[in-house]
Amino acid sequence: MLEVRNLAVNYRGVCGLDHVSFKIEPGQLVGILGPNGAGKSTMLKAMLGLVPVSSGLVNYCTGPLHQQLERVAYVPQRSQIDWDYPITVWNVVMMARTRQLGWFRRPGRAAQEIVKTALDRVEMTHLKQRRIGELSGGQQQRVFLARALAQQADIFLFDEPFAGVDKKTEAIILEVFEELRSQGKILLVSNHDWGQSLTRLDRLLLLNQRLIADGSPQEVMTPENLQSAYGGSLQTPLYQDVDTNLFC
């Protein structure tokens, strides 16, 4: 089980995350929803120890998650990646195995097969020698999805994986999520607009610094909860786009 308990982040006196708590069982696909600046990215980074926390614990199995990072695959937002770095698709994905092997050991046949299988799964093998900066946004996202797969982790954290991708990439990502869930992996995925994909989630966390609601999409996506998270009138496009028939 992955447990987040009273996790809080403050930036020079400004609240970035306000004592958030939840648990995720193996084999669950959990979405995070909230407005811009709600703390979605901050929460994922805080869970991994990438930003300092003011309070709280994040445990996996018997110990702190930040001491078991080899068991976590994290895909940040595309805006946080240097796409001008001169590295090929193959080498990006191989980085997942290099971390396992150590920087001074040459990847063997087993590691190469893992990387090839991951690239095959996201339909990017034919571009394995292309530099990542030459790819489309959807192709870039698929490369980092392949790297996550090649890591063979137990926990997968994705920050806005659907931003700026094409329909084919979106479909591949959702298919891979289903496969990982069926393998008993833990998936925590932030997205600013889940749309029809809400029905694929086991649970949804509605966040705006604090955790406003945690439950099935049916339980979370109520007008009251959405107004609490986003504010404003229920006549704004945000609320008009919520299709209540999804939950019938």
Image: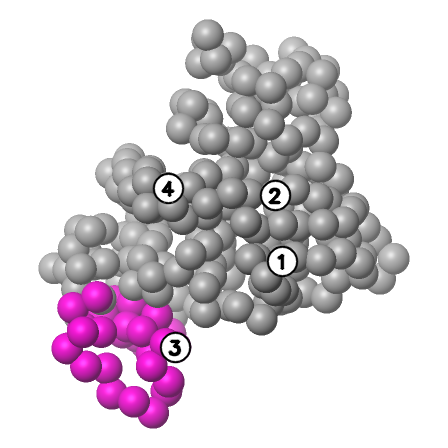
Where does residue 120 sit, x and y in percent of width and height?
Answer: 16, 55
Residue picked out by circle 3:
99
Which label belongs to residue 181?
Answer: 4
Extreme residue in the left direction: 126
How far apart marks 1 and 2 lie (CA) works out to: 10 Å
The total number of labels drawn is 4
The amino acid pointed to by label 3 is: Arg
Which mark is first along the chain, 2 or 1?
A: 2
Give the magenta part as a residue range.
Answer: 85-114
Q: Earlier in the sequence, mark 2 or mark 4?
A: 2
Q: What separation in Å lies between label 4 and label 1 (alpha carbons)?
A: 20 Å
**Taking 112 as reference, is 244 above or below it?**
above
Please tell me whether mark 2 sits on a helix, a strand or a loop: strand
Considering only order in the chain, which callout, 3 or 1, is on the residue closer to the N terminus?
1
Q: CA distance from mark 1 to mark 3?
A: 22 Å
**Which residue is found at the position 44% from the left and 14% from the top?**
246
Is residue 205 visible in this depiction of the protein? yes
Q: Crowdedness of circle 1 by 10 Å Cα count: few (<14), some, many (20+)?
A: some
- Within 10 Å of the Cα at label 4, are there few (<14), some (14-19), or many (20+) other Cα atoms? some
Q: Is residue 207 above or below residue 40?
A: above
Marks 2 and 4, Cα distance to the nearest angstrom? 16 Å
Residue extending furthest toward the bottom? 104
Would you say residue 47 sits in the magenta stretch? no
- Give the farthest residue toward the right: 13
* Residue shown at 32% from the left, 40% from the top: 182
Q: Are marks 1 and 2 in contact (CB under 8 Å)?
A: no
Q: Which residue is mark 1?
A: 59
Residue 222 coordinates in the image, percent (x, y): 63, 16
What residue is pinned by disc 2?
23
Query: What is the secondary structure assignment of the residue under circle 3?
Result: helix
Magenta span contains residue 93: yes
Query: Spatial distance from mark 3 to mark 2, Cα to Cα?
Result: 28 Å
